[in-house]
């Protein structure tokens, strides 16, 4: 269990911390990972999200998150209208995702000029979430701490490149996880750090060979 | 490290000669590596949010299912025009509990305390008292620390989620937290706070989580009234010097034991309890759930 503000809090739009606040957070993390507001989003709801999502505003909360709204944003109930105003197309469908947590959403994000991204996450209660799949690769992170997500080619030396770049920027690594789809294929590194990673260090990483994409999630920054 | 028991917290209070709320604040600052001022500021934010959220109630708004929304306004009209059985103050508490529960169901802003479904209990007790008796705001923020500290001990020994331990973990815990908090406002020490919380928890022990159609509406909104009224009754008993014969830590452990034995149909699955009645099933069917 977390701190006293997990007991008294969060401040959120009702009615459910798992189905509303958690859903908004899933949308928000998806947007942050995509790096911008998608032009088109396809959202799939699984399990309890599919069964009771409408009554809990899960659909509205997910779209709100994709529009950059926090879980306490008063515009969550009218997020569909906001999406229309801002020109974000979206569809929401129910889908049975085999073996997934009951409160799971899958989001496909598209925008011109950038690769399409697919993220799967679930809501674990109290407004907290876990991202469990990124572009088909299994991952596991919450986005509650500073998190660096790196897509790279699965080849020798890439992990060292990342750790030395962070070391150079005097960033301490709290946890590090590596995932890949197949040997020599696409890999994902999820690095949780104690400090905010400066822009220069991220640019340094992006310029390295074999690194495809770098995204940094700052828990205190909305974008 | 947060307190694992009320006994441990009370020892700390005695050793350092500090009130319970202060012991909670100090631990919060230590745990999160923030200053006491920073912690206080954040708690003040929670209090102000509770005040604003309550005032945001709209008597004509109904939830998406149409089941709840107007209840708070109805209670106000009744209180103003009739003589409520429970008296004027308690009728205000009940109205405020309904308003917050309705706000939550109608997708308005709330403070989950300890959960979204139980968000009405604390504001119903604390905000109503604050406005009725013109208490200094600092006292109310101290009271929120008392509530949070009690909630944390419950979370550490048992749980706060209906899916884990039934409604006793949500409305029950909210009621225990509110009982302790209002005792602090009335000058009760940590013994009185512990007794009030223990009695409130015992009175709601075994309460199941049985939301109709899985929505946080029926019976959740009205259970906030039950939790708030129960909190005030427990607080009055404790302030009268009545003690819980079972110590609070053991009451919480018993609550955990009861929750563990609770059938899954009674833990936020929308299957058992009132959700399973013909009327409850009919609502679920109509909403396509």
Image (cartoon, coloured by chain):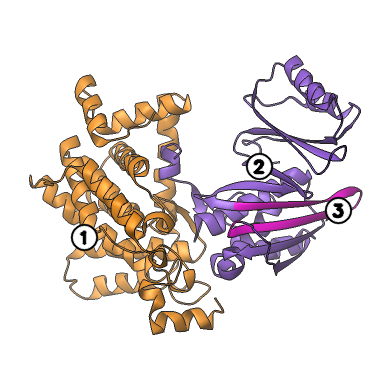
Chain colours: A purple, B orange
Any magenta on residue A23? no
Are the residues flagged by discs 3 and 1 in contact, CB closer than 8 Å? no
3D distance between C-alphas at marks 3 and 2: 25 Å
The residue lying furthest to the front in this view is A183
Q: What stretch is highlighted in magenta?
A: A101-122
Q: Residues within 10 Å of mark 3 (few under 14, many from 20)?
A: some
- Residue B113, horizontal then vertical, whole percent: 39, 50
Nearest to viewer (mark 1 / mark 2): 2
Chain ID for label 3?
A: A
What element does badge 3 sit on?
strand
For disc 1, the marked residue is B89
- Residue A2, horizontal then vertical, whole percent: 46, 38
Chain ID for label 2?
A: A
Are the residues flagged by discs 1 and 2 in contact, CB closer than 8 Å? no
Q: Main secondary structure of the magenta part?
A: strand
For disc 2, the marked residue is A140
Q: Viewed as shown, does residue B223 lie left or right of B213?
A: left
Q: In this view, does A193 lie above or below B57?
A: above
Are the residues flagged by discs 3 and 2 in contact, CB closer than 8 Å? no
- To the question of a shared chain for discs 1 and 2, the answer is no
Frontmost residue, B88 versus A109:
A109
What element does badge 1 sit on?
helix
**In this view of the protein, can residue A213 be seen by the observer?**
no
Any magenta on residue A119? yes
For disc 3, the marked residue is A111
Mark number for residue B1?
Answer: none
Quadrant containing the C terminus of chain A is top right
Nearest to viewer (mark 3 / mark 2): 2
Of pointers 3 and 2, the one earlier in the residue sequence: 3
């Amino acid at each position: 269990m977390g701190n006293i503000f997990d007991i008294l809090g969060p401040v959120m739009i009702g009615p459910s911390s798992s189905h509303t606040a958690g859903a908004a957070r899933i949308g928000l993390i998806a947007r942050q990972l995509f790096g911008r507001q998608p032009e088109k989003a396809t959202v799939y709801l699984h399990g309890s999200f599919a069964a009771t999502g409408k009554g809990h505003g899960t659909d509205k909360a997910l779209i709100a998150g994709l529009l950059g709204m926090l879980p306490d944003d008063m515009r969550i109930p009218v997020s569909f209208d906001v999406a229309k105003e801002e020109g974000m197309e979206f569809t929401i469908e129910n889908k049975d995702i085999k073996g997934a947590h009951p409160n799971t959403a899958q989001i496909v994000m598209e925008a011109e000029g950038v690769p399409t991204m697919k993220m799967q996450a679930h809501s674990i209660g109290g407004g907290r979430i876990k991202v469990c799949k990124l572009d088909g690769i299994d991952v596991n992170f919450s986005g509650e701490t500073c998190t660096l997500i790196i897509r790279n080619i699965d080849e020798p030396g890439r992990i060292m490149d990342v750790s030395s770049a962070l070391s150079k920027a005097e960033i301490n690594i709290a946890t590090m996880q590596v995932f890949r789809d197949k040997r020599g294929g696409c890999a994902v590194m999820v690095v949780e750090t104690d400090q905010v990673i400066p822009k220069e260090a991220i640019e340094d990483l992006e310029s390295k060979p074999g690194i495809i994409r770098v995204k940094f999630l700052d828990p205190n920054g909305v974008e | 490290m947060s307190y694992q028991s009320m006994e441990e917290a009370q020892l700390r209070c005695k050793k350092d000669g500090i009130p319970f709320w202060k012991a909670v604040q100090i631990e919060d600052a230590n745990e999160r590596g923030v200053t006491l001022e920073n912690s206080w500021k954040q708690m003040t934010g929670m209090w102000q949010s509770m005040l604003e959220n309550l005032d945001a109630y709209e008597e004509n708004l109904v939830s998406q299912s149409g089941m709840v929304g107007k209840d708070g306004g109805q209670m106000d009209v009744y209180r103003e025009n009739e003589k409520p059985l429970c008296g004027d103050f308690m009728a205000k508490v009940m109205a405020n509990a309904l308003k917050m529960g309705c706000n939550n169901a109608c997708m308005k802003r709330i403070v989950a305390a300890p959960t979204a479904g139980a968000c009405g209990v604390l504001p119903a007790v604390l905000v109503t008292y604050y406005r009725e008796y013109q208490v200094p705001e600092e006292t109310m923020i101290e009271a929120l620390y008392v509530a949070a500290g009690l909630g944390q001990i419950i979370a550490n020994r048992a749980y706060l989620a209906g899916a884990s331990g039934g409604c006793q973990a949500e409305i029950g815990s909210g009621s225990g937290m509110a009982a302790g908090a209002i005792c602090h406002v009335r000058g009760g020490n940590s013994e009185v706070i512990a007794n009030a919380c223990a009695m409130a928890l015992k009175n709601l022990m075994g309460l199941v989580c049985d939301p109709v159609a899985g929505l946080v509406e029926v019976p959740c909104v009205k259970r906030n009234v039950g939790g708030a009224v129960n909190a005030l009754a427990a607080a009055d008993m404790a302030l009268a010097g009545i003690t819980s014969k079972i110590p609070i830590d053991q009451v919480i452990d018993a609550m955990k034991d009861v929750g563990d034995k609770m059938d899954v149909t009674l833990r936020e699955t929308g299957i058992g309890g009132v959700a399973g009645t013909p009327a409850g099933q009919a609502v679920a069917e109509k909403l396509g759930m």
